Image: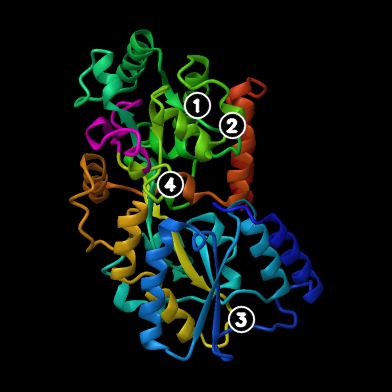
Amino acid sequence: MKHRAVWSAVLVAALALAGCGSAGGTRSPSGGADGKLVVWDWKSGEASARAYLEKAKADFARKHPDVTVEFVAQPFEQYYTLLGTAIQAGKGPDVMLFNGGGQIRDRADALLPLDEYLTDDRQRLAGWDAFTKDGKTYAAPVTLQGHPIYYNRALYDKAGLDPASPATTWSKFLADCATITRRTGAKCLALGNKEGYGIQFFLSAFGSGVFSTQEYDDWIAGKRDWTSPHVKRIFALWKEAQDAKLNSDGANSTAMFNDSFAIFQSAKAAHVIGLMSDVGHWKDFSEFLTAEKLGVMRAPVVVPGATPSLPYDGGIGYGVARWTRDPRVAADLVRSLTSTDALKSFYADAGAIAADTTIDVSQGGPAVATIVADLKAGKPALHVALSSKTLELMGRLSQQLLSGSISVDEAVKQLAASDQAG
């Protein structure tokens, strides 16, 4: 994630001068009519995405040789603020990158439904649900994003545990963690919650070990019962893990990206809830842990009868702005950005689990093989079903839960009110 604060400030000022007010105001789109499409993302400045983008641009150039494509890499930390300013002004990029879930759903009014353009890609790509709202698709998935629980098999060996048999119940998980800490000095979980992201990963990684199948499906479908004792149990687990000293020290002052992952990579913690995409994932970890030392486990069962599964959705995907001049040309660029050859490069160079289900990942090692095998029984991540406002609140409350300044009951009550307010 590149830092370009000066450019960001200039851009915000320029957009503000160009026109504030509602998105229905005067617009001056790029749109392809002048032979140019502008793309905003936070990936195009990264070396690991270079070959991916080159192949996508080459594919698009074959279809539209007279259209120039300009990628503008924004700093991720400010991306949605900048995008919100552009949307408010009714001008900005033609194509934009989104995280799946609340971030794109909250901005769907500024985007074009792409269903009519993406019919031929439906079977090849997975992860569509994270980019849909009210039955319409607003972006095509580039990656699959999930939250595997990675573990250090070497620490298991050192602690006298069987690395091929990680815990399948919460009580066994606690016992294994105690053994690892006693015999190796390593903490159980590497946790970074400075930004409030840690609770999102925890909810999705451990939730399937708490909810029944019906509760899980209802949560994803928007029928969330915040009075359920199982909902409370998840947030109680979050606090219990802290109180039991399972977490690495100073979680509320540790950034997830990438400080918490560094704790895991340096063997100071035996487990971490990581990602499947191109950061904090199997390929990153393999730089410090050989493929044979990196394990992936499902959530331990907390409530008897729960069926643990891999939580995953569409990770990132490109959508098209409503103000683009030629939607079909812009949609063709999205298709090029999700083409098989391009996504093969993204997987090879960045280690991202691509949304393209035809890509061969057999050479990725045991961890990626386990992840891909678990996709068949996987379910959408619990936190992705929540709005961005509720996720922001959950982040703040999670910090208070770790510090002991709020009760689980009060935190769940506030989250229920936020979720139900829409």
**Side of 241 relative to 281 (left or right):** right
Asked whether 344 or 134 is in front, the reply is 344
Residue type at mark 1 is Trp
Label 2–label 3 contact, CB within 8 A: no
Quadrant hosting residue 161: top left
Q: Position of residue 124 (x, y in %)?
A: 26, 68
Q: Secondary structure at mark 1?
A: helix
Residue placed at 63% from the left, 20% from the top?
404
The residue beneath circle 1 is 238
Mark 3 and mark 1: Cα distance apart in space: 43 Å
Asked whether the beta carbons under mark 2 and mark 1 sit within 8 Å of each other, the answer is yes
- Rendered residue at 35%/53% (across/down): 352
Residue 64, compared with residue 400, is above or below; it is: below
Residue at the image point whose x is 43% and y is 46% from the top: 279
- SS assignment at label 3: loop
> Residue 199: image x %, image y %?
52, 35
* Among numbered discs 2 and 1, the one appearing first in the sequence: 1
In the rendered image, is residue 206 in sight?
yes
> Which range is magenta?
284-308
Horizontal side of 2 relative to 115 (left or right) equals right
Q: Residue 155, how many percent across, how many down?
A: 30, 20
Q: Earlier in the sequence, mark 4 or mark 2?
A: 4
Residues under labels 4 and 3: Cα distance? 32 Å
Give the x, y percent position of residue 23: 70, 74
- Residue of label 3: 323
Name the residue tied to disc 2. Answer: 398
The residues tagged by marks 2 and 3 sit, at their Cα atoms, a distance apart of 38 Å
